[in-house]
Image (spheres, rainbow, N blue to C red):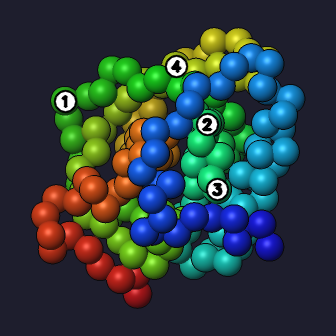
């Protein structure tokens, strides 16, 4: 199972800042993207009753590159993403993570955001997200900067085991 590649809470690598991707690295990253896809779908199947796991960041499998893979209606690969236009409006969420799949963390995220990124053809793209997709992207983006949801908890009582 490829999902065994997931780095678990407590591993210091989860707190490292990821390196930007150079254009000539794209071909070498295709197996990583395939792994991210496969792991995402393993988690979706294994934890189907949660209805979660729509995105994964490369650092979660020890690849310290600025790469996010999301699958909503179709796969989207975000290379060197940059978050902009974070809304003033915020929302409270119970966040989870593949690095701690049974733990929920109560935290605050921006209701909407814009992300600029390169696609696999090295073309600049931009996407505006709201609600749960905005929250998801902010979560995955945090992984690129070595930030975990546990660090964004509202307070020290904002943790729950998933039922």
Residue furthest to the top in view is 124
Q: CA–CA distance between discs 2 and 1? A: 29 Å
Q: Helix, strand, or loop for circle 3?
A: helix
* Local SS, label 2: loop
Q: Earlier in the sequence, mark 1 or mark 4?
A: 1
Q: From the viewer's perspective, is 7 left or right of 113?
A: right
Residue drawn at 19 percent across, 29 percent down: 88
Question: Which dot marks residue 88?
Answer: 1
- Labels 4 and 3: the sequence-earlier one: 3
**In the structure shown, which secondary structural element does the residue marked by tag 1 occupy?**
loop
Nearer to us: label 4 or label 3: 3
Circle 2 is placed at which residue position?
Answer: 65
Q: Quadrant of the C terminus?
A: bottom left
Tag nearer the camera, 4 or 2:
2
Q: Considering depth in this image, is 157 or 10 the residue closer to the camera?
A: 10
Going from the N terminus, do you reach mark 3 or mark 1 first?
3
Q: Position of residue 113 (x, y in %)?
A: 38, 29
Determine which quarter of the picture holds residue 69: top right
Crowding near the residue tagged with mark 4, few <14, some 14–19, many ≥20 C-alpha atoms within 10 Å: some
Q: Which residue is mark 4?
A: 116
Q: Earlier in the sequence, mark 4 or mark 2?
A: 2
Judged by depth in the image, the label closer to the viewer, 3 or 1, is: 3
Kindly tell me whether residue 52 is visible in this rendering.
Answer: yes
Would you say residue 132 is visible in this rendering? Answer: no
């Amino acid at each position: 199972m490829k999902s065994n590649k997931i780095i678990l809470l407590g591993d210091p690598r989860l707190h490292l800042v990821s390196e930007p991707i150079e254009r000539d690295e794209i071909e070498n990253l295709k197996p990583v993207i395939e792994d991210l896809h496969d792991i995402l779908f393993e988690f979706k199947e294994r934890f189907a009753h949660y209805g979660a796991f729509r995105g994964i960041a490369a650092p979660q499998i020890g690849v310290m590159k600025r790469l996010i893979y999301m699958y909503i209606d179709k796969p989207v690969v975000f290379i060197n993403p940059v978050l902009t236009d974070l809304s003033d409006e915020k929302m409270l969420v119970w966040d989870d993570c593949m690095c701690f799949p049974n733990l929920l963390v109560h935290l605050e995220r921006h209701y909407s955001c814009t992300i600029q990124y390169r696609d696999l053809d090295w073309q600049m793209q931009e996407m505006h997200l709201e609600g749960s997709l905005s929250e998801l992207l902010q979560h995955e983006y945090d992984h690129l900067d070595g930030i975990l949801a546990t660090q964004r908890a509202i307070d020290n009582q904002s943790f729950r085991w998933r039922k």
